Image: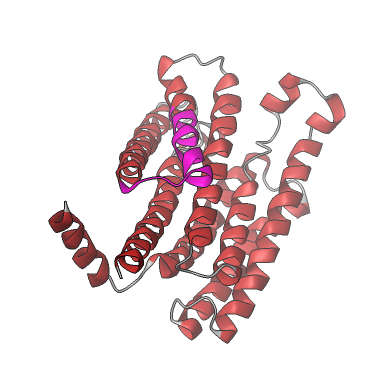
Amino acid sequence: MNQKHAMINRVVSAVEVGPCGLIELFCFSNLAFLTIDIYFAHSINAFAMSTEWIPFYFSIVGSVALIVSMIKGKLEPNEKWSKVLGLIVGWGAVITGVLGMIYHLESRFFKEYTLASLVYAAPFAAPLSYTGIGLLLIMNRTVKYGTRNWWQWVIVLGLGGFAGNFVLSVLDHAQNGFYEWTEWIPVIASAVAVGVLIPLIWERVTKAFLLVVVWVMVTQMLVGGLGFYFHGIADLQGSSESMWENLVFGAPIFAPLLFANIALLVLIGLWGGYIWMMTQENESDH
């Protein structure tokens, strides 16, 4: 077992970018990708309201700011420019996400207050992707890396992401009454993910349990890939002759990739947790 841990430690030490730097790259790549995702989502009604352009432009400006932040800080979030720019983008993302959720609910649910209006309204949890990115940027600058709090906060945000996936999967697939049995897969998968992540927050877990969570996250990635395939097939077989219209009005092509995306975030947190556990063991040996 010691040889196994020694091998893992050698691999970890050989990687130049640690968990803290990977969080910066994760936030940038997600914010940049949201530019495309928002364009698809809001093209459904051709950006009917001017406010629908806000997240689109914020994603572009925020991504550029994070590029500057990473270049200036060399993936060190507490370098002067990196910290300032990261906090500005972070708080901006939090506000954008919360306001987006309110606007989505206001589009129908706040007017009718029915379960049907919640199912068929704009997906109210979707804008919270911005809030999650913002909280990650803020956390990476306000919580000391290398501590138990740091990696557990990453897990908390990953847990929130899977909880959001559960809600989105239920509401999205309820629109057609879960016509295909495969539409239950993301619901069950996200529930399992939430279940295995909760102990990481409240209990002092072992490295063996971390390995269990790693395999669950690998499974989540497979679920995301499978969902991407099913959504893609559904869009290719759409009723419209225009592929663009099938992509815009059909099954949300990028939605299943959230499973793989959030699983990656959790894996970064688990890496941080493993490093912290090994540090604690080394200190106790001396």
Compared with 83, 128 (above or below) is: above
Can you give x and y, in whole percent of width and height, for residue 101 in the image? 72, 44
Residue positioned 56% across, 17% down in the render = 176
Q: Position of residue 266 (x, y in %)?
A: 43, 50
How is the structure coloured here? secondary structure
Instruction: Report x, y in % for residue 18.
Output: 36, 69
Q: Give the quadrant of the C terminus.
A: bottom left
Residue visible at 54% across and 73% down? 66
- Residue 1 horizontal side relative to residue 44, left or right: left
Residue 244 visible? The answer is: no
The residue nearer to you, when weighing 267 against 183, is 267
Residue located farthest toward the left when viewing the structure as drawn: 3
Q: Is residue 197 left or right of residue 10?
A: right
Name the one closer to the observer, 178 or 86: 86
Q: Quadrant of residue 209?
A: top left
- Residue at image x 50%, y 75%? 67
Within the image, what quadrant is residue 172 found in?
top right
Magenta span contains residue 139? no
By secondary structure, the bulk of the magenta-drawn segment is best described as helix
> Would you place residue 170 above or below residue 25 in this image?
above
* Residue closer to the observer: 44 or 29: 29
Identify whether 22 is placed above or below 196. below
- Which stretch is magenta? 189-207
